[in-house]
Amino acid sequence: MRKPAAVECLYLDFDGFFASVEQQARPGLRGRPVGVVPFAGTNRTCVIAASKEAKARGVTNVMNVADALRICPDIALIPQSPDLYRRAHNTLLAEIATVVPIDAIKSIDELACRVDAAQATRPRAVAHAVKSRIVRNVGSSITCSIGFAANRHLAKIACKMDKPDGVTIWSPDVLPGPLLALKLEDIPGIGRRMEGRLAAAGIKTTRQLYEAQPKRLRKIWNNVIGERMWYALHGYALAAEPTERGMFGHGRVLSPEERTLPKARDMARLLLVKAARRLRREGYLASRLLVFLELRGGEWTQRRSLPAVRDDQAVLSAFEVIWAETRRLPRNSLVFRVGVQLYDISPSDERQTDMLLDDDAERQRWEAITAATDALNSKYGGTFVHIGDWSPPEGGNAGGKISYTRIPSAEDFW
Amino acid sequence: MSWKSNIQLRDLADNQRLEFTCKKCGHTRYLKATDLLDVTGAMYLYLDEVESRARCNQRGCGGQGRLALEQSSLSSGFIGGMA
């Protein structure tokens, strides 16, 4: 494996991304402690993102709203606006890409770039160019921290060293000094459970981890990740392998007034249509459908095979068969969360028809109908044509959730 | 100068989509780079020029909008916490 002699990777992490985008969009919030919450009107939730002013007062991400209000009574609690964050993400990335090409988008607020040989000789100037471009063309409320190192993993660790709005350069000649000063818990990939396993193996410090043999780490991790961690920490040119998509799904925690079975059905159906649209947009077919309910006192899951499909009629028909099974549940069941998954996927140009089903002509007809409805919805920018009822929840955002592995597109909010 | 002043339509990949959001009514639609390139002479336009010429297609609106590049193809997850 190649061991670079200079920095090759830039890792950029936006500071309190959701909160700083809110501050940029609403000048009245600038300079004030801001906490972004999942929805308005209740204290029984948590702060999903805190601004740097709130963090300076002790508020942390995923802190209960009640606790945040206790330590910072004047915090402005703002309901999340996923579509705003998505648009800010696209604009910021377009600006960054004019300075340095983006190699991988790791989440809505983290990305990795590959620096060329000329840029590697002046990393601080590259970081300055990125930051000044953001200030000039997007706004001064959105800041980022940047790390440079020989690989993505080290660059990610480096970028956390000087938050907010910092630049850290870990060129191969300065390592492993600053790395060894860290606690094990500061290294991405070492959670509480892994820390316990390392401790059981006699590894309690980053120096001990660094000096361990790669095969030993593989044994402790019980997979190849341990060995890859060793090579990453030692500055070899290494990055996570591209992940393959395994399923298209959506889940949603229901609001108190939606927690009945009929309302859960409407929500699950809507989420399934949105998942099927994503499946089609990305060019896949699904052969299995899963519907999941989190109920008071337990969970309910049903699966059903599909004949490698992607049209709305096929997935909704299978959904109705699955949902019919809920008649076995008590009528007054309280549903806290619903989830749907289309999985066992294959590329849409590799469809294998079922010789016993003989449904190819029917599938082609429904696919043509679905393609026509998709085209109309795309042309007019919303869900104007659909099969059956379509009643999105108030407040929207169904199917537009931001996760580490998924940044929604505008179509997910339609 | 924003990123839109640096990129011409001919620089975009064929499957690249541009997101157009109307500043007047908020309507969002997608424009395909290949469709835009079919317009005579458009390949040499910079994206800020495309943006200033594009209009909202909602009935009765016709407002100017903002262009954004869709970036989803570069998304990649963490594996075992490693970037």
Image: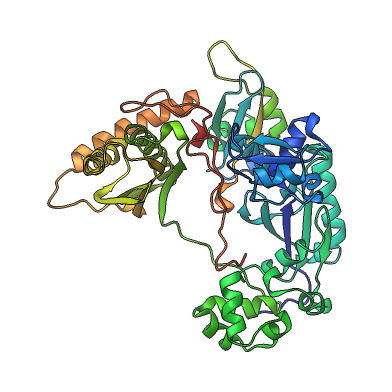
Q: Nearer the viewer, residue A364 or B75?
A: B75
Residue A120: where, in percent of width, then height? 81, 66
Residue A290 against residue A174 in the figure, above or below: above
Q: Nearer the viewer, residue A340 or A204?
A: A204
> Residue A318 sits in which quadrant?
top left
> Residue B41 sits in which quadrant?
top right
Is residue A162 toward the left or the right of residue B4 in the image? right
The residue lying furthest to the left in this view is: A356
Residue A325: where, in percent of width, then height? 22, 44
Is residue A158 toward the left or the right of residue A314 in the image? right
Residue A8: where, in percent of width, then height? 74, 67
The residue lying furthest to the top in this view is: B60
Residue A210 against residue A257 in the figure, above or below: below
Q: Is residue B80 visible?
A: yes
Q: Nearer the viewer, residue A118 or A203?
A: A203
Q: Is residue A92 visible?
A: no
Is residue A224 toward the left or the right of residue A190 in the image? left
Residue A199 against residue A288 in the figure, above or below: below
Residue A28: where, in percent of width, then height? 80, 29
| Figure quadrant of the N terminus of chain A | bottom right
Count the numbered circles shown.
0
Residue shown at 25%/42% (left/top)?
Answer: A326
Which coloring applies here? Answer: rainbow
